[in-house]
Image (cartoon, rainbow, N blue to C red):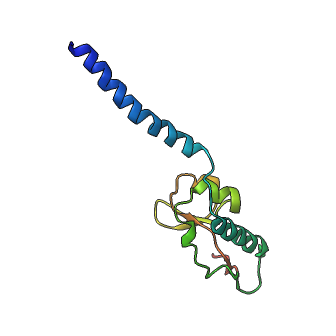
Amino acid sequence: MGLLPILVIVIGLIAGLVAPRLFGHIGAVSAEPTLTAQQEDLLSEFRSCLSSLPKQVTSTVASPCAEKNATLLRGIPRATFASRLGHPDWCKSAQQSLLPWSKQSCASSSVWGYSFYRLVAVGGGP
């Protein structure tokens, strides 16, 4: 038995072990993850809280979801949040400033979130 058949067998074994993981991973990235019933309920509740908040207020408003524990949602991809809750309310810039959400300002930001508060606008500046 020469070196070539052994090499072909080794490459075949490696491909057999790596390919399913690689293609399985690629498939998992493109598909929406399967959420538990608890996660679905929590996302639904957050969506309801966000949609009930007024856009402009004359006094501070805090949603009932403002203090809700969201640890059940750890690990859920950003795309899932966006599809269920809409675009985030804010992001953190490269200069570490919090910015209101905009595609232009926040496209490359890895830190973003939703606000369950509405505050009264203060002053217009000079």
Q: Residue at x 78, y 74 (%)?
A: 52
In the rendered image, residue 100, in percent from the top left (x then y), is placed at 63, 65
Name the residue: 60% across, 53% down. 33
What number of labels is visible? 0
Instruction: State which quarter of the image contains the C terminus.
Output: bottom right
In which quarter of the view is residue 64 placed?
bottom right
| Quarter of the image where one finds residue 41 | bottom right
Out of 119 and 81, give the one closest to the viewer: 81
Where does residue 93 sit, x and y in percent of width and height?
51, 61
Image location of residue 113, percent across then percent down: 59, 67
From what the image shows, is residue 104 above or below residue 11?
Answer: below
Along the horizontal axis of the image, is 26 left or right of 123?
A: left
Tell me which residue sits at (58%, 56%) in the image: 78
Residue 71 % position (x, y): 54, 72
Q: Quadrant of residue 116?
A: bottom right
Q: Is residue 86 visible?
A: no
The extreme bottom residue here reads 59
Q: Residue furthest front?
A: 1
Q: Is residue 22 visible?
A: yes
Comparing 95 with 123, the one in front is: 95
- Front residue of 42 and 78: 42
Seen at 57% across and 66% down, the residue is: 73
Q: Is residue 120 above or below residue 23?
A: below
* Quarter of the figure with the N terminus: top left
